[in-house]
Amino acid sequence: MTESAVPDSLAVRSRGTGLKLGRFRDLTLVPVIILLLIVGSFADPVFMTTGNLTNVLQQQSALALVVLAEALVLIAGKFDLSLESTVGLAPALAVMLVIPTSAGGFGLGVPVALAIPLCLLIGAAVGAFNGFLILRFQLSAFIVTLAMLIVVRGLQTGITGGKSLFALPPSFLYLGSATWLGIPAAIWITAVLFAAGIVVLRFFRTGRALYAIGGNADAARAAGIRVERVTWVVFVISGTLAAVAGMLETGRLGGISANQGDGWIFMVFAAAVIGGVSMDGGKGTILGALTGVLVIGLVENILTLKGVPGEWRNLVYGAIILVALMISRLAGGKAQD
Amino acid sequence: MTVTETAAVEARGITKRFGPTVALNDAGIVITPGETHALVGRNGAGKSTLVSILTGLQRPDLGEVLFAGEPSPPLTDRDAWRRRVACVYQKSTIIPSLTVAENLFINRQTERGPINWRALRARARQLLDQYGVAVDADSLAGDLNVEERQLVEIARALSFGARFIILDEPTAQLDGPAIERLFERMRDLRNQGVTMMFISHHLEEVYQVCQSVTVFRDARHVVTAPVADLPHDELVKAMTGEETQAYESKAREIDGGAKVVLSASGLRLKDRYEDVDLAVRSGEIVGLAGSGSSGKVGLAESLVGLRKPDGGDVTVNGTAIRPGDVTAALKAGLGFVPQDRHHEGFVPLLSIAENATMPIAHKLGRFGMISGERRKARATTMIQDLDIKTTGPDQPVGDLSGGNAQKVVLARALADSPAALVVINPTAGVDVKAKQSLLGAVEDATARGTGVLLVSDELDDLRICDRVLVMFHGKVVKDVPRGWSENDLVAAMEGIDS
Ligand SMILES: Nc1ncnc2c1ncn2[C@@H]1O[C@H](COP(=O)(O)OP(=O)(O)O)[C@@H](O)[C@H]1O
Ligand SMILES: [Mg+2]
């Protein structure tokens, strides 16, 4: 055998470039964010003020939590479309359990202090039910949660009679409206939850298990990961996060409309995907998803400041998401999936 | 085996059913410490099912597994299993989106608390060094080639301290030199006292690395014997249950003036192959041989349109094909069997009937409607022609064993009576008998006037070719007529001119 006939497949090949890009893949949207900041400051002098930027963050915090929830589910290789309906149902049902009939509630006399725990519990229950259907009956997550999106929304319109709820207990509105150390509490809460998500998914075995499950469920099972249990817990957590989002949104707006959260899921997916979270599972980071939320929030803010007419909003919005996708694809180097 | 010695591994009276399928029927195996024990059998004989039972992934319906005479641990205790048995499964258990380092320590990145990535990488490097695996711990596992991925799996499997390792068809996807390196490694492990169970469809490999062999047939244990006591023919007989002759290729007259049905001129693709000219005539089988890095698969994929060449022309049945246009190639009368049947060959959840008739769907009904009856009839004929072992045309292809799934892929390629057929490694991971019916089907197509380009790593397959083109480092270096000797062909493939 001549020497050249031996393939060099065993030699350490230099994969340096791909790797470095891979490591910074979380941050491929940073140039887009910087660009948006520059564009924004030229577009309107108000844009770069602390007040405006804080405002952007507060407005996006509820959506951001749903993106966090969706990112967890996507990384574990599943899908949850019903989160947007949970954003409406969880606070609505929780509040109706504690307020009197005169205010539109059930008049059950449940202590007001239980409103927040109930809200979280309802979110968790919706997630648990999704997980149960998907895992126990081995149904497609897409279809199950699509049906649940309709069922949960339907439940909310059913119990509220399609009406908005306004007379809410102040304790329930507090977290969504309070300001701590000059910054809205909603921003603090979202920041803490994101930080927790980033750390758990990067540094803890349970977090890494999501990547293993999303990447190759059989391999994860062979490695001793309890695939079904972990996936189920992910659904429960994401349902709970959607409930938190619903509570913050309720506090910010001071009421719960029958369509709270309606249509969010498109923005949620857009943010997660431009942030580098793969729809095929096993890829992406929470930090990346966060950058996706920021892009969406900044675009929305600039469009508002520029007074783009409502009828044209969606067009500009969608176009900018497409551009962001292309940029992240170019910067990331790998095919988007 | 001496009576006094406790078996390293023993499975007794194992029965396992999957719905109506009995995958194992009161089967068993006894493996002596320190030996390399082959497990052979046709596709679907139950080998991989035994592997998943021996590694604690599945619970047998009946029977028990013993390690060194001790009962096996409970299924939930994965770590206990992994201390007893290491395994490289037939399906890769590497997670492509994670780094090599994380794959090595999946679900045990740390004892408790947060993961220290730096320490993890260091441990990974140490483990790779220890087993002499020259891959970068930081690279993504998805970027590794098949051989590297397998080595990572072996290193990971052994890192649990198991002294028994199972290799389920490890050579099916490796080329010659890589197989040699794997065997070298297996011999080293054996010298260190590691016990192994080795599964392969290449019976000559069994004689190369194993001391004893167990044969399964139709979910049952047939025989266990030292390899020396079971010569090749008897082994094949035990596997198939009947006397089987080695495949005899059919004699053919090649008409030198027959129409050229597939040709390439000046075809090139950077880092793959360059300046390739070839012509396949109607009624002729042309082989394409070469080592793993010769570019033969890349070339074949370019002819089909799966891969876009940088330059040059491809003609199918007289029609020039735009580079990288699979649809146009199919329309012009090309059929193909891709390298990776799981990725490009079939849709696992669809039935045999649907998969096999995909290219002719337009002929089975009008206005885009497909007649179920006609499709079924066609599929039934195909099942008979190719001797596909199945419960019927409605069975999903994903449920078939490897050899039978491959037959469906070939059936599909032949469905439209193509003028030209490109077949890439049709017999990889396929048992002896299935191999014969696959090669037979290719030859039958030739008799009907199809021109075939057969790309293969198996010299046996190339025996049916009228001539073999040998590629080396991206160039066609030789055109060998029928009647070649193995040595000459191998020498040409390795770039040694005799
Ligand atoms: N998870 C499963 N579900 C249904 N049938 C299966 C499953 N695994 C294996 N089988 C069936 O069991 C039989 C034995 O398969 P297998 O053990 O993979 O064979 P081998 O590895 O010897 O080719 C085949 O008929 C196969 O179709
Ligand atoms: Mg098998």
Image: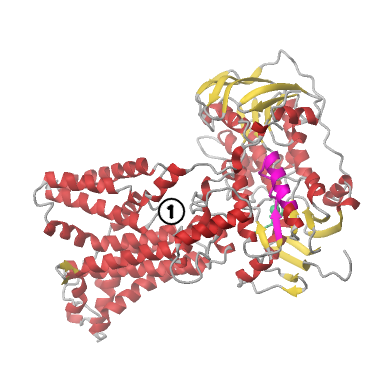
Which quadrant holds residue A17?
Answer: top left
Kind of residue at disc 1: Lys
> Is any part of residue A74 visible from this angle?
yes
B170 in the magenta segment: yes
Q: Is mark 1 within 8 Å of ligand 1?
A: no
Residue B281, located in which quarter of the rendered image?
Answer: top right
Q: In the image shown, does B166 or B435 lie closer to the viewer?
A: B166
Colouring: secondary structure
Q: Position of residue A173 (x, y in %)?
A: 19, 74
Q: Which chain hosts label 1?
A: A
* Front residue of this view, candidates A129 and B95: B95
Q: A10 or A171: which is nearer to us?
A: A10
Q: Quadrant of the N terminus of chain A?
A: top right
Residue B21 visible within the image: no
**What range of the chain is rendered magenta?**
B165-187
- Residue at x-position 34% and y-position 44%: A328
Q: Residues within 10 Å of mark 1 (few under 14, many from 20)?
A: many
Within the magenta stretch, is there residue B449?
no
Which of B488 and B27 lies nearest the eye of the viewer?
B488
Q: Secondary structure at mark 1?
A: loop
Q: Judge whether B320 appears above or below B11 on screen.
A: above
Task: Indicate the position of residue B411 as horizontal and vertical percent values.
Answer: 67, 38
Tell me if B102 is positioned left or right of A50 in this view: right
Name which residue lies at 60% across and 72% down.
Answer: B76
**Residue B2 screen position, x and y as percent:** 89, 66
In this figure, which residue is indicated by the disc labeled 1? A283
**Residue B175 in the figure: left or right of residue A69:** right
- Residue depicted at 48% across the width and 63% down the height: A209
Q: Please, which residue is most extreme toward the top here?
A: B257
| Left or right for A113, reference A277 | left
Q: Position of residue A75 (x, y in %)?
A: 43, 58
Quadrant assignment, res A117: bottom left
